[in-house]
Image (cartoon, helix red, strand yellow):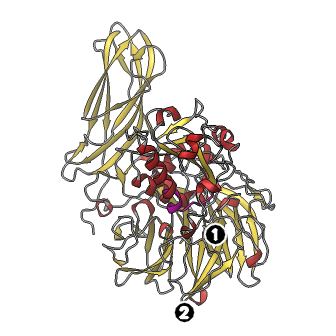
Amino acid sequence: MRTKVFLLVAALAAVALGAAALLAQNDGETNVQELRFAGNPRYPAPDFPEGLDWINVPAPLSLNDLRGKVVILDFWTYGCINCIHMIPVLRRLEEQYPNELVVIGVHSAKFENEGVTENIREIVQRYELHHPVINDNEFIVWRTYGRYGVNAWPTFAIIDPRGNIYAVQPGEIPFEVFDQHIRGMISEFDALGEIDRTPVELALEGEGQPAGVLAYPGKVLADPDGNRLFIADTNHNRIVIADLDNYQVLDVIGSGARGFDDGDYDTATFNKPQGMTLNPAGDTLYVADVENHAIRAVNLTERTVTTIAGTGEQSYIRNQIGAPLSVGLNSPWDVLYGPNDILYIAMAGPHQLWSLDLNQGVIMPLVGSGREGLVNAAFMDSELAQPSGLHLHDNLLYFADSESSSIRVANLETETVDIVAGPLENNLFAFGDVDGKVGVSRLQHPLGVTGDENGVIYITDTYNSRIKRIDPDSKTTTTVFGVGDHSFRDGGPDEAAFYEPGGLDYANGKLYVADTNNHAVRVIDLETNIVSTVAFPNPEALQMEGRITVAGGNQAQAMRITLDAQTVAPGAGEIVLRIALPDGYKINEQAPSQVQWNSANGAIQLEDAGHSLPVRTSELRVPVQLTEGSDTLTGALNLYYCEAVRETLCYIDDVTVEVPVTVAAEATTSEIVVTREITPPEIAVGGL
């Protein structure tokens, strides 16, 4: 499905992007021959069509706007591991050439879920993309550039400062290869006075939004023996340890900075950690440190972090065997401690499962040829597709095979691979949201798998935002939680909602779910069939220093309140919003509190209907025009209220209020008064 191109730094002169490109650079025209790093004027880059959703910019761009700049078009889809691998490369190029280079992500989605603009907005924030992104879910831009060689994820098109296509290249391309050509292009066109260093105006997604105590948590690990809950706080680059009963924060592993440093809890650094596992003694935590391409070991007694596998650099060699610290890894997404001190690793990058023998000190591939596919056979003849979650039961190693949208199982005794949910055919585009037996059931990019003591399997069907149960004997999949609307609600099976949950674990009759896009950990009580959200009683322990941090709120309650009916006089009037907070709390002026007013009929006429209005103080007045009749005023309130002393520790009040209103001549007031009384949660004083 995806093409990989391995261009070695040592062979840059021989394997140049221009030489490997589909387009010939020399057509006999003088101006092309004079410039080594120029596109061919016979191939002007097609401009972007109208009507596409643009992200990270205040308005759509055109290639005419970008004359004088080097432009890279990145054709990608957000679940693709090869596309993910290119993000640090593109980020490094943007840092190297901040005013000369513009990267534009052309997001041409593989999965239906990936084509939704709001989901792309989330992924842009999760991946920390600071360049323009287009939602090309109808493949309009893809097809336009298809004639030049765009046919795989990822593919890159380089456009020179005159707007001509210079090169089109699929696959993972090293920084050094890109850099040689971009540096040469900038140098040549700069000498001609044709480089425009005017910055492109950006409007970054999520900019100005307060941080949460968690940021896109990817995985969780429940430890009933130690009464601990481990949370991979992925975008905060740290591991959180909480009490399994009351969720008191017990410790934080990692400084929160992105990096690859061993050390104590305060100085060690991670880079997008995901899966975790404990040794039987419960004193060592192993972490899949994805973007460091490493396995880290946390000594929970000495409070130290040590790298035990990987070099810190991504490796493209699939079939290595050797000492763990000398063998390069490739996006380890999950890790699981098995019998005989074997660590099993879901190696998403090369589409394999690996094993690390902690006694012998040897790491090697265990399952998967390295070819991407859905082929069930003997271990090394099987084809996997981005395995991302692991669970072991009775020598059966279950894995969430995300890009094949299936749950598969490696039998450690027979050394064969089978499938328990998803399609039977080798088709990486056979996905959906269908319960039933294997072959009939359809999933969409599942990332997490766990099981109970009886062997029942539970999964996060990530892109469908559902939790599903699999009977391993009948290979039947059943949706058990999540209505699938990508939102945030607690409650029973018919109302609870998740948003791209990435991982889950089971302990004592409960499922603990990393609800990634909701920045939360959810708890499913399998006895009561109720979903709740973890609230940390000491959230200040998770506060990022100096940043406004949202410690919690009522978002998962989907609160809707109807106030008493009011009668007002026709003519000019006002909506008066009054926010009542107890002593010790205030509305934070720096946080983006807002309200959106709407009316059902024409009796209340709002100039700013449907628009979000900022809320800076405890009272807000909005002018309205009132006409005799009946109406219903609706206000969607999203308020950040903070402690008066620790004013950067905040909570969210998210509620919809409705007010029945009658406009009549005999009324004595023209004010519609909406009072919101907020009761803050109880908080334990203290912290780490």
Residue found farthest to the bottom: 360
Q: Quadrant of residue 252?
A: bottom left
- Point out which mark residue 359 bears: 2
Question: Label 1: how many residues lie within 10 Å, few (<14), some (14-19) or many (20+)?
Answer: many
- Tell me whether circle 2 and circle 1 mark residues in contact (CB < 8 Å): no
Three-letter amino acid code of the residue under disc 2: Asn
Residue 118 x/y as whole percent: 53, 42
User: Percent from the top left, x then y, of residue 162?
Assistant: 52, 38
- Horizontal side of 50 relative to 437 (left or right) equals left
- Give the magenta range: 170-179
**Quick check: 581 left or right of 401?**
left
| Mark 2 crowdedness (10 Å alpha carbons): few <14, some 14-19, many ≥20 | few
Picture layout, residue 12 above or below residue 601: below
Q: Is residue 178 magenta?
A: yes
Location of the C terminus by quadrant is bottom left
Name the residue nearer the viewer: 411 or 45. Answer: 45
Residue found at x 71% / y 72%: 409
Position of 513 relative to 583 (above/below): below
Is 113 rendered above or below residue 225? Answer: above
Quarter holding residue 660: top left
**Residue 97 position in % (x across, y down):** 41, 51
Circle 1 is placed at which residue position? 350
For badge 1, the amino acid type reads Pro
Residue 657 visible in rendering: yes
Q: Nearer the viewer, mark 2 or mark 1?
A: 1
x then y, percent, for residue 274: 50, 67
Q: Secondary structure at mark 2?
A: loop
User: Is residue 484 visible in the rendered structure shown here?
Assistant: no
In the displayed structure image, the side of residue 81 where residue 58 appears, left or right: left
